Image (cartoon, rainbow, N blue to C red):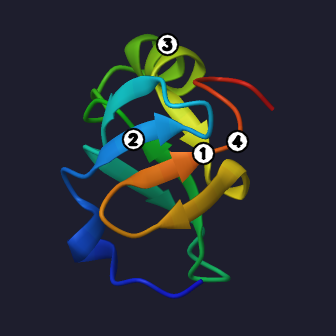
Amino acid sequence: MTTKLSRMYGMDIFTDGGKFLGNAQDFIVDAESGEISRVLLEQLPPSKEDARKVLREKSILYKNVKSVEDVIVVTKGIGRE
């Protein structure tokens, strides 16, 4: 699946069961591989403690993204491995 990252900003995110999770607000990209590792439902805050909370409670592993078309469809919800 190849999609421009800029196109994904603000997209609605749904589970494959139809539950709305939020909007794609930011992304974490692996600098070595150039691949997205997480989709964030909030901007990553500057403090480490707040950033950990967002990663745990407001992000989705990109490996759980099933499709990216008009919306982003994921197989697992927020913070799940």
Badge 2 or badge 1: first in the primary sequence = 2
Q: Considering only vertical position in the picture, is 62 above or below 70?
A: above
Image-quadrant location for residue 13: top left
Q: Is residue 27 left or right of residue 23?
A: right
Q: Which residue is mark 4?
A: 75
Q: Amino acid at mark 2?
A: Ile
Give how far apart the Cα atoms at labels 2 and 4 are: 11 Å
Mark 1 secondary-structure assignment: strand
Mark 2 secondary-structure assignment: strand
Q: Which residue is mark 3?
A: 53
- The numbered disc on residue 19 is none
Q: Amino acid at mark 1?
A: Val
Between 78 and 48, the residue placed more toward the observer is: 78
Q: Which residue is mark 1?
A: 74
Badge 1 or badge 3: first in the primary sequence = 3
Name the image quarter holding the N terminus.
bottom right
Q: Residue at x 39, y 13 (%)?
A: 50
Image-quadrant location for residue 81: top right
Give how far apart the Cα atoms at labels 2 and 3 are: 19 Å
Tags 2 and 4 touching, CB below 8 Å: no
Q: Is residue 39 left or right of residue 76?
A: left
Tags 4 and 1 touching, CB below 8 Å: yes
Tags 4 and 3 touching, CB below 8 Å: no
Q: Which residue is mark 2?
A: 13
Tags 2 and 1 touching, CB below 8 Å: yes
